[in-house]
Image: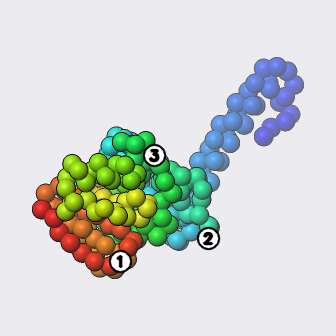
């Protein structure tokens, strides 16, 4: 920044403005460079999420430079919130990484629509009464933050299911009539309803 023009009130105002402009530019440039760097490495992991029942989008940077980011993990917890009970839980890291892996296969720009994330025991019991025991497990992994029901706009559900099954990281349920798949990090198994 030029210091020689700071001689009067007007001069200070001008150079400060230039300085701010320059800082904003440098910050943007650094950010772009950083994004390009991260795009070429596995240093940063993000998830783009749409919480269907909250009508809200979430952008979660949950991993950076060999460590998990609390703020990003918290963003994921919020996206998984049980809106009926207005309760949150800590979503299992394995499930988060499974979603990230799925994301790498379908395209990292894609967004997961979350139909059902965390379920409090009360909400799970309520759903069982509404939908029946065949559709909602008594000890659902949704209650442990280890399961999620999702769909992705522009990706056929069958394809999403096939990729999830191929990863062999847990259970995959296919619900073509309801328009989502269930994935969890429990035992490896598959099922179809509808
Ligand atoms: Zn489910």
Residue 134 to residue 76: above or below: below
Who comes first in sequence, dot 1 or dot 2?
2
21 relative to 189 in the view: left or right: right
Element at badge 1?
A: loop
Q: Position of residue 106 (x, y in %)?
A: 31, 67
Residue at x 16% of width, y 64% of height: 193
Q: Position of residue 48 (x, y in %)?
A: 41, 54
Q: Which residue is mark 1?
A: 187
Q: What separation in Å lies between label 1 and label 3 (alpha carbons)?
A: 26 Å
Residue 66's disc is 2
Camera-nearest residue between 177 and 84: 84
Of the pair 39 and 148, the residue shown nearer to us: 148
Report the front residue among 27 and 95: 95
**Disc 3: residue Cβ within 8 A of ligand 1's nearest atom:** no
Which quadrant is the N terminus positioned in?
top right
First in sequence: mark 2 vs mark 3: 2
Determine the image quadrant of residue 182.
bottom left
Label 3: how many Cα within 10 Å (few below 14, some 14–19, many 20+): some
Distance from the alpha carbon under mark 2 to that under mark 3: 30 Å
CB under 8 Å between discs 1 and 3: no
How dense is the environment of label 1, judged by Cα within 10 Å: few (below 14), some, or many (20 and up)? few
Mark on residue 87?
3
- Mark 1 or 3 closer to N-term? 3
141 and 33: which one is in front? Answer: 141
């Amino acid at each position: 920044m030029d210091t020689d023009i700071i001689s009067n009130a007007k001069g200070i105002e001008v150079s400060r403005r230039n300085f701010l402009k320059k800082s904003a530019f440098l910050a943007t440039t650094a950010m772009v460079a950083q994004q390009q760097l991260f795009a070429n490495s596995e240093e940063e992991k993000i998830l783009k999420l749409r919480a269907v029942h909250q009508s809200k989008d979430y952008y979660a940077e949950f991993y950076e430079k060999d460590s998990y980011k609390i703020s990003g993990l918290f963003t994921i917890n919020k996206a998984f919130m049980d809106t009926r009970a207005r309760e949150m839980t800590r979503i299992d890291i394995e499930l988060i990484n499974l979603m990230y892996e799925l994301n790498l296969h379908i395209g990292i720009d894609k967004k997961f629509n979350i139909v059902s994330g965390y379920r409090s025991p009360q909400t799970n019991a309520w759903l069982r009464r509404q939908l029946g025991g065949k559709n909602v497990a008594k000890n659902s992994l949704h209650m442990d933050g280890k399961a999620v029901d999702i769909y992705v706009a522009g990706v056929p559900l069958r394809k999403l299911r096939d990729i999830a099954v191929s990863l062999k990281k847990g259970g995959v349920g296919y619900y073509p009539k309801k328009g989502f798949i269930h994935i969890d990090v429990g035992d490896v198994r598959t099922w179809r309803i509808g």
